Each structure stands twice: as structure tokens, then as C-alpha cells.
Amino acid sequence: MKLNANKKLFIVWGEQTELSRQLAQGLSAELRQIYYKKIGPYNLPAFFRYILQAAETLLVLFYEKPAIVITQNPPVFAPLTALIYCKIFGAKLAIDSHTAAFLDRKWQRFYPLFRFAACCAALNSCHNYKNLEILKDWKIEPAMVMQFANPVYETEKLSLPLAEARLEEKLKQSQLPVMMVNRFAADDDWETVIRTAGLMPEADFFITGRPSGEIQAPANVYLTGYLKHEEFLKLMSRCRVALAFSLRPDTVLWSIREIMALNKPFVTTDSEVLRHYYGEVGLFAKSDADEIKNKILEAARAENEIKNKIKIFLEKDRVRWYNEIEKFNNFLT
């Protein structure tokens, strides 16, 4: 079978995200989301979902005959499936491994499969230098860090009123609106932020996501529920300070890129990795209500100075992104 030398596919077994879209675009690859979440109203167990996704992936690859296949990991079964095609027909495989593939317990159980796929790949990319250290410990070469690109949003759309009039009105009345990017996941530090809100009656805290149960919070906390992405960005654009916290170590947060795209001062987790990448522009706090309060006030006081730093950072970081794209492509030529 003759491969299509001009065809490059980026396969994602999951929800299509801004991350995957940007990476595929940067690499001039066609993005294919292959994801079976439900049959009718019923959620599919992971085992059956992966079988269906593997079958469709092989059908797509055999039909389109790409010379280069890029897969997102996790789940590790996506690169393993693509590897079957690549081994049979001599195509090149690149694996873009997210931090969850290295740190989440459910995926650490599959480390042997991850290492096998990584050893067979023409290139492995990951999202921060701590992830890269793991690949180097496994003697995986070539491997590289592929940090996120910075999104660009249409400011005119973001200036339109929020769909929820009550939320729009509260934002207009607030002297210090603070937004927390949050999903109420196990690694989200929302409990500490709610305690922080109790120390700051002069501020209003808008926390995204939907909790699984009832939450006791002071009157200046507003739980927005899950928002459509455009509404999420509108909310962020109206807040003076944004919060992005993760209790998971060695994690670089995509939400920081969204925050910087809107030129908002932000407070994030005081971790080695986040200081390494965003030390020039971010404010950092441990999981402590008093410390977070002080950093929010500092961000509000230095708002204009921080915004100027973010603009300079983004200009330099654009060069970094194009250099990484070039490096990635050079490994696969």
C-alpha cells in the first residue's frame, strides 16, 4: 500500500479541545476526533468505547493512508492502535502525551504499554520539563517539550452581555470581581478559595463548574455552573483577577493561557513547574486562604504593571511556539 506522503493525521480519543485544535493546526495536520461516549442515552463503559474507537481509527488510517500519524495520550490505547497501522505500512508515529498520562494513577497502571508505544514512536512530545524527565528516565529518544500555544479571542464578541442577566448585573456592581477557573474535580483547590472569599467581603468570587453536592459558601461567592466557552471567556474578561489552581503536582494549566489571552492578572499554584514557565508574569500562592487573599490584593494593586508584563511575555512566547513547531516537524521529516 502506497502511503499518502502529504497526509498527516492527528487522532484524539476524547473531547476535542482548544489544545488539540491548536496543535493540529500548528503541525498542519488534519484533526480527527474519534470518540464514542454514549449509545443513545447510555454511557459506554471504557472497555467497549476503546474497542469501537480502535476499530474506527484503523478504518480511517487504512482508508486515508497518512504518512504521519500523531495521537494524543491518554488514553494510551490510541497510540497503540495507531502503532499497528504504522508498523504494517511504515508510517511514522508521534505521541503527544498530556500530564495525566504521567501522573494520574489510572494511567500509571499502564506505564508498560506507554513505554512500549513511546519506544516505537518516531517522536514523543510532552507538556513540561518534569514530564520530559520521566521520558528520559525511560531512555525514550527523541523526546521534546511541546508547550501550549497562546489562543487569540475576538474582543468584540466578549464585550456582548452575558446570557445570564443576573450574573452580568452582579459583575457590573462588583468593585473587585475575582474568577476561579474550576471544575470541582479532585485536583481543584476550590475549598481554599471559598475560605479566601470569607476573608474578603470587599470582593466577589465567581467560581465555575458544578459541585456534586451542596456547598456552604459566604454570600460573596457565586457558583456559575458549567458555562459555554464563549460565556466562560466573557466572565473572565469582566473580572479583575483570575485564579487557576491545581493540587496535582508538575502540572501546567491550560487555563493560564486563556487568562493571559485576555490580559488578566492571575494567581496560580506555587509549584516549581508553574514558576518555571510563568514566573515573569504570575503571582503564586500555596493552598492557604490568607496567602491567596494577599496575592489577589497584590494582583489588583499592580494590575496595569502585570498587564504590560503579560503583553511582553506573549510576544516572546509566540517565537517559542513557532520554534517548537519547527522542531517537531523536523523530527518527522
Image (tube, rainbow, N blue to C red):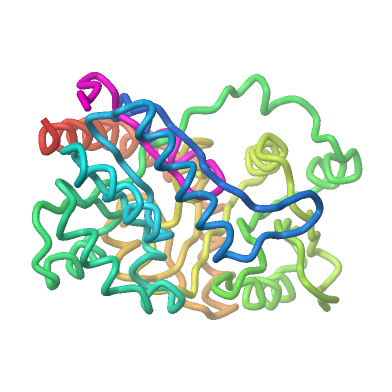
Q: Which of these two is toward me, 50 or 103?
A: 50
Picture layout, residue 51 above or below residue 316? below
- Left or right of 233? Residue 219 is right
Q: Quadrant of residue 4?
A: top left
**What residue appears at the point 83 percent right and 78 percent down from the top-left corner?**
216
**What residue appears at the point 58 percent right and 53 percent down from the top-left corner?**
242
Picture layout, residue 52 above or below residue 291? above
Stretch of the chain drawn in magenta: 1-22
Q: Which of these two is toward me, 120 or 162?
A: 120
- Left or right of 8? Residue 264 is right
Q: Residue furthest right?
A: 166
Residue 191: where, in percent of width, then height? 66, 77
**What residue appears at the point 55 percent right and 66 percent down from the top-left corner?**
47
Residue 115: where, in percent of width, then height? 22, 67
- Left or right of 213? Residue 260 is left
Residue 108: where, in percent of width, then height? 36, 76
Magenta highlight on residue 7: yes
Q: Quadrant of residue 253?
A: bottom left
Quarter of the image containing the N terminus? top left
